[in-house]
Image (tube, rainbow, N blue to C red):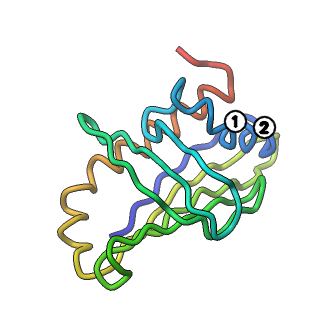
Amino acid sequence: MQIRDSIVIKAPVDRVWEEFRDFASYPEWNPFITSFEGKIAPSERVAVKLCMGRWTMPISPVLTIVEPERQLSWVVEQGSSFIYNVERHFLFDPLPGNRTHFIQSETSAGFLSPLIGAVLFVPVVKGYRKFNQALKARVEGTEQ
Protein backbone atom coordinates (compact mmCIF):
# COMPACT_ATOMS: atom_id res chain seq x y z
CA MET A 1 0.00 0.00 0.00
CA GLN A 2 1.26 3.47 -0.84
CA ILE A 3 -0.01 6.79 0.46
CA ARG A 4 1.21 10.25 -0.47
CA ASP A 5 -0.03 13.74 0.32
CA SER A 6 1.63 17.11 -0.01
CA ILE A 7 1.07 20.80 0.46
CA VAL A 8 2.85 24.04 -0.50
CA ILE A 9 3.65 26.26 2.47
CA LYS A 10 4.42 29.94 2.03
CA ALA A 11 7.61 29.92 4.08
CA PRO A 12 11.25 28.93 3.55
CA VAL A 13 12.34 25.37 4.31
CA ASP A 14 14.19 26.31 7.50
CA ARG A 15 11.02 27.82 9.00
CA VAL A 16 8.89 24.79 8.05
CA TRP A 17 11.53 22.39 9.42
CA GLU A 18 11.77 24.41 12.65
CA GLU A 19 8.03 24.04 13.28
CA PHE A 20 7.95 20.40 12.16
CA ARG A 21 10.91 19.61 14.43
CA ASP A 22 9.26 21.18 17.51
CA PHE A 23 7.76 17.86 18.57
CA ALA A 24 6.97 19.13 22.07
CA SER A 25 4.34 21.45 20.57
CA TYR A 26 2.55 18.72 18.59
CA PRO A 27 -0.22 18.24 21.19
CA GLU A 28 -1.12 21.94 20.73
CA TRP A 29 -1.65 21.87 16.97
CA ASN A 30 -1.04 18.52 15.26
CA PRO A 31 -4.32 16.60 14.82
CA PHE A 32 -2.62 13.44 13.48
CA ILE A 33 0.69 12.97 15.33
CA THR A 34 -0.31 13.96 18.83
CA SER A 35 2.92 12.86 20.51
CA PHE A 36 6.51 12.39 19.29
CA GLU A 37 9.22 11.64 21.85
CA GLY A 38 12.79 10.44 21.65
CA LYS A 39 16.26 11.25 20.39
CA ILE A 40 16.23 12.46 16.79
CA ALA A 41 19.07 10.57 15.13
CA PRO A 42 19.37 7.69 12.67
CA SER A 43 18.80 4.24 14.22
CA GLU A 44 17.03 5.71 17.27
CA ARG A 45 13.63 4.35 18.32
CA VAL A 46 11.04 7.02 19.08
CA ALA A 47 7.57 6.90 20.64
CA VAL A 48 4.78 8.27 18.47
CA LYS A 49 1.03 8.47 18.93
CA LEU A 50 -1.20 8.73 15.86
CA CYS A 51 -4.77 9.97 16.16
CA MET A 52 -6.83 7.68 13.95
CA GLY A 53 -10.23 9.27 14.40
CA ARG A 54 -11.81 7.86 17.54
CA TRP A 55 -8.73 5.99 18.70
CA THR A 56 -5.05 6.61 19.22
CA MET A 57 -2.43 4.23 17.85
CA PRO A 58 0.95 4.16 19.62
CA ILE A 59 3.87 3.15 17.43
CA SER A 60 7.61 2.79 18.04
CA PRO A 61 9.35 3.57 14.77
CA VAL A 62 13.09 3.51 14.19
CA LEU A 63 14.42 6.63 12.49
CA THR A 64 16.23 5.76 9.27
CA ILE A 65 17.02 9.18 7.77
CA VAL A 66 17.47 12.48 9.60
CA GLU A 67 18.59 15.27 7.28
CA PRO A 68 17.68 18.65 8.79
CA GLU A 69 15.62 20.86 6.49
CA ARG A 70 15.44 18.03 3.95
CA GLN A 71 14.01 14.74 5.24
CA LEU A 72 12.98 12.66 8.22
CA SER A 73 12.09 9.00 7.67
CA TRP A 74 11.24 6.02 9.83
CA VAL A 75 10.32 2.36 9.64
CA VAL A 76 7.86 0.43 11.79
CA GLU A 77 7.91 -3.36 11.85
CA GLN A 78 5.24 -5.55 13.37
CA GLY A 79 6.82 -8.91 14.13
CA SER A 80 9.24 -8.77 11.20
CA SER A 81 9.39 -7.10 7.82
CA PHE A 82 7.92 -10.29 6.35
CA ILE A 83 4.74 -9.88 8.43
CA TYR A 84 4.20 -6.10 8.21
CA ASN A 85 6.32 -2.98 7.91
CA VAL A 86 5.78 0.65 7.05
CA GLU A 87 8.31 3.17 5.77
CA ARG A 88 7.20 6.77 6.28
CA HIS A 89 8.90 9.84 4.84
CA PHE A 90 8.57 13.55 5.53
CA LEU A 91 10.22 15.56 2.75
CA PHE A 92 10.94 19.29 2.57
CA ASP A 93 11.55 20.62 -0.95
CA PRO A 94 12.46 24.30 -1.35
CA LEU A 95 10.50 26.21 -3.98
CA PRO A 96 11.12 29.63 -5.52
CA GLY A 97 9.66 32.57 -3.65
CA ASN A 98 10.52 31.32 -0.14
CA ARG A 99 8.01 28.48 -0.33
CA THR A 100 8.28 24.82 0.70
CA HIS A 101 6.72 21.72 -0.81
CA PHE A 102 6.05 19.48 2.21
CA ILE A 103 5.47 15.85 1.28
CA GLN A 104 4.39 12.93 3.44
CA SER A 105 4.47 9.42 2.04
CA GLU A 106 4.45 5.87 3.24
CA THR A 107 4.78 2.42 1.78
CA SER A 108 3.71 -0.71 3.58
CA ALA A 109 4.69 -4.25 2.77
CA GLY A 110 4.54 -7.72 4.22
CA PHE A 111 2.10 -10.57 4.47
CA LEU A 112 -0.48 -8.58 6.47
CA SER A 113 -0.15 -5.36 4.47
CA PRO A 114 -3.35 -5.81 2.40
CA LEU A 115 -5.44 -6.55 5.48
CA ILE A 116 -4.00 -3.78 7.67
CA GLY A 117 -4.03 -1.39 4.72
CA ALA A 118 -7.74 -1.98 4.17
CA VAL A 119 -8.44 -0.94 7.75
CA LEU A 120 -5.99 1.97 8.05
CA PHE A 121 -5.97 3.53 4.57
CA VAL A 122 -8.79 6.05 5.08
CA PRO A 123 -7.75 7.19 8.60
CA VAL A 124 -4.13 7.60 7.50
CA VAL A 125 -5.04 9.61 4.38
CA LYS A 126 -7.28 11.86 6.48
CA GLY A 127 -4.52 12.18 9.07
CA TYR A 128 -1.95 13.21 6.47
CA ARG A 129 -4.25 15.90 5.11
CA LYS A 130 -5.09 17.25 8.56
CA PHE A 131 -1.39 17.28 9.52
CA ASN A 132 -0.42 19.10 6.32
CA GLN A 133 -3.15 21.71 6.68
CA ALA A 134 -2.33 22.28 10.36
CA LEU A 135 1.41 22.64 9.67
CA LYS A 136 0.70 25.11 6.88
CA ALA A 137 -1.61 27.15 9.11
CA ARG A 138 0.88 27.14 11.99
CA VAL A 139 3.86 28.17 9.85
CA GLU A 140 1.97 30.79 7.87
CA GLY A 141 0.37 32.19 11.02
CA THR A 142 -3.16 31.50 9.86
CA GLU A 143 -4.22 29.20 12.70
CA GLN A 144 -7.90 29.30 13.42
Q: Secondary structure at mark 2?
A: helix
- Tell me the kind of residue under disc 1: Glu
**Left or right: where does residue 101 sit relative to residue 31?**
right
- Tell me if residue 2 comes above or below residue 7 in the rendering: below
Across and down, in percent, residue 63 comes to 60, 64
| 94 left or right of 51 in image | right
Q: Residue at x 51, y 34 (%)?
A: 133
Q: Nearer the viewer, residue 92 or 115?
A: 115
Query: Could you tell me the amino acid type at mark 2?
Result: Arg
| Residue under numbered circle 2 | 15
Pointer 2: residues within 10 angstroms few (<14), some, or many (20+)? Answer: some
In this figure, which residue is indicated by the disc labeled 1? 19
Q: Position of residue 85 (x, y in %)?
A: 38, 73
Are dots 1 and 2 in contact, CB under 8 Å? yes
Q: Which mark is residue 42?
A: none
In the image, residue 70 above or below residue 137: below
Q: Residue at point 81% right, 40% down?
A: 98
Real-space Cα separation, disc 1 to disc 2, in angstroms = 6 Å
Quadrant location of the N terminus in the rendered image:
bottom left
Left/right placement of residue 134 relative to residue 138 reads left
Q: Nearer the viewer, residue 31 or 11?
A: 31
Q: Position of residue 28 (x, y in %)?
A: 54, 23
| Left or right: where 125 falls relative to 37 | left
